[in-house]
Amino acid sequence: MSGPERTDGGLIVEVRDRVAYATIDRPERMNAISVGLADDLVDAFDAFSTDRDVWAVVLSATGERAFCAGADLKDMGAADAARAGTGGARSGGRRPGAVPMTGSRRNFFEVILECSKPTVASVFGWAMGGGCELAIACDVRIAADDLRIGMPEAKRGLGANFGSVVLPRVVPLGVAYQMLYTGEPLDAATALHWGLVQQVVPRAELAERTEALVRSIVANAPLTTQRYKAMITKGRDLPTSAALRLNAGPNPYLSEDRKEGVAAFLEKRSPDWQAR
């Protein structure tokens, strides 16, 4: 067990009973994404991918108003003003509040998307722009009934590179176009209807229901769930004949857990998974 630790960028990280919890903790900024937070998300999800004691991950946030309001536009505006004051000279560091897709540092949306473990986003309130992108980078999304989720980048002259690629793979194409073109948010019921979230629960029950969901995942064989994720991620855009011949992720058929699962069934007991 690893107790909660808060990074300088505002991310609380904890590992408890096979589940890693990454909690955005910038409620005074509506949990907006700063450069520091983006870097901390990269570090955290990179670590989760290779930690054998982590079998699933929950991404959540503190506060009452917003899961994540997107990029920190106040930081972005300050950076724009600073550049204007120096004749538009480029600074040596990364642009505060921006969500870069290239450069020497991996993009945090991609790191979350490519995490080898099952990921669950627990979302509430406003999940806009980068907040929506954080949610769709996860495998499963459970939402509070006060959710307002959308991609308002067209209203701000931004680009939503990640969202414009991934959102049409999550919701029907026309819905993705409408969300991107208009920038208007969806409420929780509409998001559920289009498969943008998988569950909607009362706000007061969100933490409890999220915990129940992630515990139902880690109760199963971890190598099997990791295999499912690898096969889906690598095979969903392939022709069926090619996808069926993939050999991605750990092979549960050759694992000790497969023997344990059979033995537990025959002995009418709960399996003791070891992830090997």
Image (cartoon, rainbow, N blue to C red):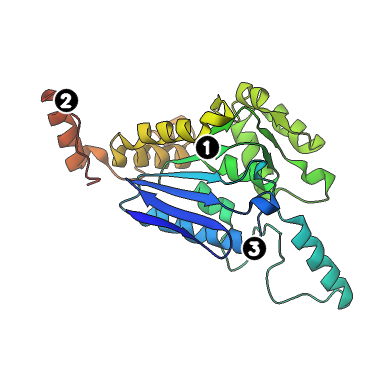
Task: State yes or no: discs 2 and 3 in contact (Cβ < 8 Å).
Answer: no
- Looking at the rendered structure, which numbered label has been put on residue 237? 1
Q: Alpha-carbon neighbours of circle 3 within 10 Å: few (<14), some, or many (≥20)? A: many
Q: Alpha-carbon neighbours of circle 2 within 10 Å: few (<14), some, or many (≥20)? A: few
Q: Position of residue 49 (x, y in %)?
A: 40, 53
Residue at image coords 19%, 38%: 272
Residue at image coords 83%, 72%: 83
Q: Which residue is mark 3?
A: 35
- Left of 58 or right of it: where is 259? left
Q: Position of residue 261 (x, y in %)?
A: 19, 32
Figure label count:
3
Query: Which residue is at the far left?
Result: 267
Q: Position of residue 112 (x, y in %)?
A: 52, 50
Label 3 amino acid? Val
Q: Nearer the viewer, mark 1 or mark 2?
A: 2
Label 1 amino acid? Asp
**In the rendered image, is residue 117 in sight?**
yes
Q: Which residue is mark 2?
A: 265
Label 2 amino acid? Phe
Observer-nearest of 248 and 48? 48
Distance, label 2 to label 3, CA atoms, is 49 Å
